[in-house]
């Protein structure tokens, strides 16, 4: 794309509004900024759209949102009038312009004769997934940038199973989007007119109640759970507040304290800055409140309430961050072992994790006679198996998770579910408290039994066109010349998910296994300008596992840094 030509087009075309024009005038002379905004269009893939807010083809704005929605509308129209009648469910989070983008999407769909069901306020991502299945719509849109910084927004597209679109549908949408370089060709109508005509309909609050009932029905134990456990909760100024508080209250947890500064929606995320609970810094205010109220566990959600993070109070009165691999292993252990004791595991049960998620849960699943399946990253892939098993009846999908603090128990939602996860973490913590154990004690028990599994994730941010090019060069450097030897291990196996026949869709990811059971994986982020290095080890002690992590990190970082 000729970024300068595209910039001039946006700057001089009367179709674009005055605010957009002023913003573009303000960057005249800043060639780097102009290039970054116009060197490409936001790519519509299985992750939908995501980018910084602002004017330009490489930014989230009403024009790019309407273009994407017209592409979705044309795709739905390919499936005929019945698909258009089934309609699209739309939800949105707390971010700047989320409501505006949701209403713009509704207006474009309605102008194309497609029925729209839209929530009347912010909702968590899992509720949107639930609504698609409950209302039997053909598709869904969630306007969110998940855990990205405040100057981002995004647009996630879903299909009729309630999970995010896969390559086949994404390809169709992207093909149609290319027909609308001229934004004036996009169909639209006034949102209020659509509501008055009935083609746009607000979703009843009854759906929230149905969702909560299904979450509550997931409970494994009730009378064996210490409901007095002290829980501190923060929604990080996002969408999870109301539903998480309600589900914990209805389960009977009596000591739930909410971080007041982070309770209400705030699109600027003033108290946290970067609203990603994968980063322990996001727990600062929760820890302060925890020390005041004697909090035993701290639970945090990201802004669209699909991810769940955890800290646990240790014996020294300090809070310990429990990462996604460890939360997942704990939940797999609790759910499978307790359901097995109760005798209510279904036939042919399956747990699902991504290719970059740790292996402790695999050992736990094997011990409980449950199969572990691996997919590519993203819940669109994890829940793709749930969709498949629903059709074939071949297996029963029990639980799925990723190391990036995404978890889902049950199948009535086909995405990460932080409301569901918060309840199950609270139940699990209360269950073990009644036995005199913290979740850290349970982790130690698992390490004693299976070995000391350890991990580290390194994310390197490389923004802009030059950053994307460097990420590509790093991937090729590892692909062409893998690290054959570490100080205490030799390379045993390589998987190139882009070139090898793995049985999974092709993706740009590399995985290297060593003869001491250590491994690492490398992949570009699908939603952020990052390259991610996932490192895993198994040791006969904590120190041994940490040493192996350091060896891989130092060797791999040295190779990455050498790529200009």
Image (spheres, grey):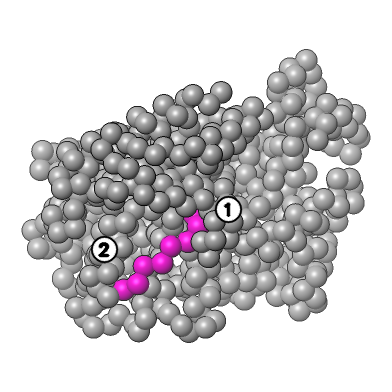
- Residue lying at the far top in this picture: please name it: 29
**Residue 506 lies in the magenta-colored region:** no
Q: Is residue 228 visible?
A: no
Apparent side of residue 34 relative to residue 476 in the rendered image (left or right): right
* Residue 286 x %, y %: 30, 40
| Residues packed near mark 2 inside 10 Å, few (<14), some (14 to 19) or many (20 plus) | some
Measure the C-alpha gap from mark 1 to mark 2. 28 Å
**Viewer-side residue, 251 vs 478:** 478
Q: Give the range drawn in magenta.
A: 370-380
* Residue 495 x %, y %: 47, 52
Q: Can residue 387 be seen in this view?
A: yes
Residue drawn at (26%, 48%) of the image? 516
Report the disc number at residue 197: none
Task: Give the residue at mark 1.
Answer: 499
Q: Earlier in the sequence, mark 1 or mark 2?
A: 2
Residue drawn at (76%, 32%) of the image? 38
In the picture shown, does residue 369 fall above or below 229? below
Apparent side of residue 236 relative to residue 256 in the rendered image (left or right): right
**Residue 374 lies in the magenta-colored region:** yes
Q: What element carries label 1?
A: loop
Q: What element carries label 2?
A: helix
Work out which quarter of the rendered image holds the C terminus and state it: top right
Report the disc number at residue 363: 2
Residue drawn at (28%, 82%) of the image? 344
Work out which quarter of the rendered image holds the N terminus and state it: top right
């Amino acid at each position: 794309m000729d970024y300068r030509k595209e910039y001039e087009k946006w700057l001089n075309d009367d179709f674009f509004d005055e605010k957009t024009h002023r913003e573009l005038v303000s960057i005249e002379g800043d060639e780097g900024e102009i290039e970054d905004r116009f060197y490409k269009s936001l790519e519509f893939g299985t992750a939908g759209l995501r980018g910084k807010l602002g004017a330009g083809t490489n930014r989230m704005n009403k024009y790019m949102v309407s273009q994407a929605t017209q592409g979705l509308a044309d795709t739905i129209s390919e499936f005929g009038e019945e698909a258009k009648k089934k309609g699209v469910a739309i939800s949105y989070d707390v971010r700047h312009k989320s409501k505006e983008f949701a209403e713009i999407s509704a207006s474009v769909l309605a102008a194309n004769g497609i029925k729209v069901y839209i929530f009347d306020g912010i909702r968590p991502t899992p509720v949107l997934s639930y609504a698609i299945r409950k209302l039997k719509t053909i598709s869904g849109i969630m306007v969110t940038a998940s855990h990205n910084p405040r100057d981002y927004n995004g647009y996630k597209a879903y299909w009729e199973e309630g999970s995010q679109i896969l390559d086949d549908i994404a390809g169709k949408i992207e093909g149609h989007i290319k027909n609308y370089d001229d934004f004036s060709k996009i169909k639209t109508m006034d949102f209020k007119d659509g509501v008055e005509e009935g083609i746009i309909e607000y979703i009843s609050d009854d759906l929230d109640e149905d969702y909560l009932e299904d979450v509550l029905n997931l409970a494994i134990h009730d009378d064996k759970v210490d409901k007095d456990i002290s829980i501190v909760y923060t929604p990080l100024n996002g969408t999870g507040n109301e539903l998480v508080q309600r589900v914990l209250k209805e389960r009977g947890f009596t000591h739930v304290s909410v971080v007041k500064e982070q309770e209400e929606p705030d699109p600027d995320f003033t108290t946290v800055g970067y609203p990603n609970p994968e980063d322990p810094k996001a727990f600062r205010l929760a820890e302060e409140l925890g020390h005041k109220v004697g909090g035993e566990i701290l639970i945090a959600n990201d802004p669209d309430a699909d991810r769940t993070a955890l800290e646990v109070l240790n014996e020294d009165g300090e809070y310990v961050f429990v990462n996604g691999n460890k939360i997942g292993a704990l939940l797999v252990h609790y759910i499978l072992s307790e359901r097995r004791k109760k005798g209510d595991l279904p036939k042919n049960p399956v747990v699902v994790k991504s290719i970059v998620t740790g292996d402790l849960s695999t050992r736990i699943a094997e011990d409980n006679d449950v199969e572990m399946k691996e997919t590519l990253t993203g819940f669109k892939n994890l829940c793709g198996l749930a969709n498949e098993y629903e059709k074939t009846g071949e297996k029963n999908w029990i639980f799925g998770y990723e190391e990036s603090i995404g978890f889902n128990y049950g199948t009535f939602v086909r995405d990460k579910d932080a409301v569901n996860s918060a309840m199950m973490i609270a139940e699990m913590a209360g269950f073990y408290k009644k036995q005199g154990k913290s979740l850290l004690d349970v982790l130690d028990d698992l390490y004693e039994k299976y070995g000391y599994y350890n991990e580290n994730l390194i994310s390197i941010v490389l923004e802009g066109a030059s950053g994307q090019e460097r990420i590509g060069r790093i991937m090729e450097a590892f692909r062409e010349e893998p690290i054959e030897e570490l100080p205490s291990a030799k390379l045993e196996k390589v998987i190139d998910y882009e070139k090898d026949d793995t049985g999974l869709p092709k993706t740009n990811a590399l995985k290297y296994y060593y003869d001491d059971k250590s491994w690492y994986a490398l992949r570009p982020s699908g939603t952020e300008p990052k390259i991610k290095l996932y490192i895993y080890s198994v040791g006969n002690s904590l120190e041994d596992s940490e040493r192996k992590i350091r060896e891989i990190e130092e060797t791999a970082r040295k190779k990455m840094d050498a790529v200009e």
